Image: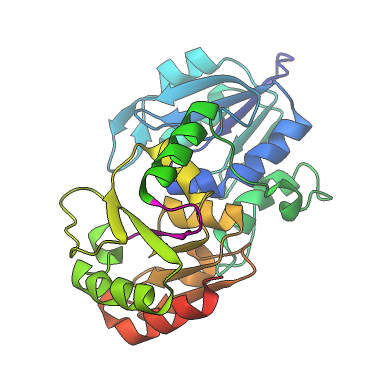
Amino acid sequence: MKHHGSKDIAVLHINAIGDQVLAWPAMRALDRLFPGRIKLVLGAGMRSVFYRDVQLKMIFRARFHDRAARTVAVEPLVRELGLCEIFIVLSDWCNESISAVVDGARPRRSIGFGSSFGECVEVASDVHMFDKIFAAVQCLDPSLVLEDFCGWPKFSPAAIGAAERLKDKHLLPEEKLLFVHPETLPLKTWARAHYNDVLPKFLKERREYRILVCTPQQFELGSHPRIHAISPHLELAMALVGLSDCFLGVDSCFLHAADLYGLPGVALFGPTNPDIWGFRLSKTARHISGGGSIENLSEEEVLEALLQVAP
């Protein structure tokens, strides 16, 4: 079907918030290529982490027919989007409803992971997700280099100020901060009893540290004068990661944010692959994998790794 000359660039990324963090370098690269021309499509209810860092023309919300199957209402989204010169799908999945949305925008070029796109992005099965998502942008300009777009996350001055105040509230000026994020999907969550064993032992060895555990209230921790449970909103919590000296956590959005910040850290893995979802950018990081089950991790191994990487 003939294209009608629109210069808008559609980018669809319907995934969890951690996947958005992993797409941050790709979005920055697209912003350099197409400043002010990007129409971003997220799923209904999804928050955007990019809008303070990328010149988006507009954000659209795809309404779901079936959220579990990730099928979206095609016609309303096509009407809202209008025509687009290029359509890029950064999600590493596709279904008939997404293909129909792409077709409805009548792009000159369509790029995504799968045979339904005009240009199929092909990467090795074990490539890190930062690289996989960025490969879609390299279809437009092969000279682009991932590391050129891996600067620190950008958040609002209000969030950064609140993070600084939260840190000042709990830490003395000379103390270092270990940011701990212990919970995510149940299969990827290490039992709180393990943290209650590891964290005090770490503090016994590293008396210059204090620990903030970013956790919902139901994740109970043992009492310790230098361990504090906090539950701030997402942007404030991610800004606090950037004010930390070290990270310990599971496969989640906070791990990927810590990686963008270049923090030293230890990442805990069970069913997911650390080669794909672990640290990619940090120069001082360790992965501890349970080979399919996070309960296979030993407290001794985690403590040893944490003592080794903490500056």
Q: How is the image coloured?
A: rainbow
Magenta residue span: 171-182
23 relative to 219 in the view: left or right: right
Q: Quadrant of residue 294?
A: bottom left
Q: Position of residue 138 (x, y in %)?
A: 74, 48
Q: Which residue is rendered at x = 65% and y = 44% of the image? A: 26
Q: Is residue 34 above or below residue 281?
A: above
104 relative to 226 in the view: left or right: right
Number of marks? 0
Magenta segment: does it hold 112? no
Q: Quadrant of residue 111?
A: top right
Magenta segment: does it hold 178? yes
Q: Position of residue 310 (x, y in %)?
A: 52, 71
Q: Is residue 292 above or below residue 10?
A: below
Note whether residue 177 is visible.
yes
Quadrant (top left, top right, bottom left, bottom right) of the N terminus = top right
Note whether residue 93 is visible.
no
Q: Position of residue 197 (x, y in %)?
A: 25, 76
Depth check, front residue: 114 or 161: 161
Q: Quadrant of residue 272?
A: bottom left
Q: Which residue is rendered at x = 30% and y = 64% of the image? A: 188
154 relative to 274 in the view: left or right: right
Residue with the most extreme right position: 143
Depth check, front residue: 257 or 16: 257
Q: Is residue 170 above or below residue 11?
A: below
